[in-house]
Image (cartoon, rainbow, N blue to C red):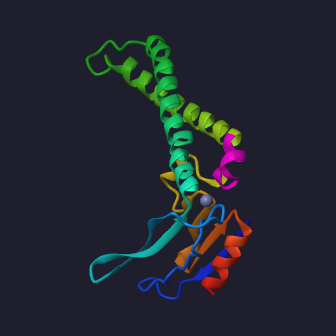
Amino acid sequence: MHTVEIPIKDAKNPPKINFPDRCVNCGKPKHTVMPLQLNMGVEKRGQGVLMDFPVPLCAECEKKERRITYVTLVPFLIAGFILGVIAFIPAMLIAPAGTTQQTLNFPFVFGGFVGMVVGVIGGTIVEFILKLLLAPAYGQLLLKRPLTILSLFNDSEDVIGLSAKFTEKKRSLKVTFENDDVGKEFGRLNS
Ligand SMILES: [Zn+2]
């Protein structure tokens, strides 16, 4: 792992990021560029300022990157849904039925709540186990990716072999490479 920290003097004029001309994950010649943009959280002339972050990948790693969705988001959703439904039924059946008009729906509300909580927790556990099993194939940075449920609150950008995150108050950008050689070259290009 190699981490490069790029200082940001002015969030309204973010520095230009230069990537080596090869895949960030394996170092082979680049086949494509993922045109990511990082939100600087400030506005200039009424428009949000974005920092260009063009990540080069080879054909093989691009395919892998696309497949990552299937080992993270998809299992989370499927497992969460199934476990949620399984939990919903008994929770609904054991909930006391209301006697008044207002409480008549209580078993459904209770069942739905229990189903949602169980679904989120169960889906997250399944996703976590899958990541552990797949890290040898996808790289250790896969484990550092936030779980789906947490990624809603997370501001890091993750691509296969790479993770980028702003430091406090966006004073700098920390870019971590799984591949040391590519990381060092990136450091030289952006110093
Ligand atoms: Zn590659």
Question: Horizontally, is 108 left or right of 162 in the view?
Answer: left
Image quarter where the C terminus lies is: bottom right
Q: Which residues are magenta?
A: 134-143
Task: Identify the residue at horizontal 27%, vertical 79% (top origin).
Answer: 46
* Quadrant hosting residue 171: bottom right
* Quadrant hosting residue 184: bottom right
Task: Identify the residue at horizontal 52%, vertical 40% (top origin).
Answer: 70
- Image location of residue 52, percent across then percent down: 44, 74
Task: Identify the residue at horizontal 58%, vertical 51% (top origin).
Answer: 146
Question: Horizontally, is 189 left or right of 37 in the view?
Answer: right
Residue 135 magenta-highlighted:
yes
Question: Horizontally, is 81 left or right of 188 in the view?
Answer: left
- Seen from the viewer's position, the closer of residues 114 and 71 is 71
- Image location of residue 141, percent across then percent down: 66, 56
Number of numbered discs present?
A: 0
- Image location of residue 90, percent across then percent down: 49, 13
* Quadrant hosting residue 43: bottom left
Residue 50 magenta-highlighted:
no
Question: Horizontally, is 105 left or right of 38 in the view?
Answer: left
- The correct choice, above or below, for 105 with respect to 15 in the image is above
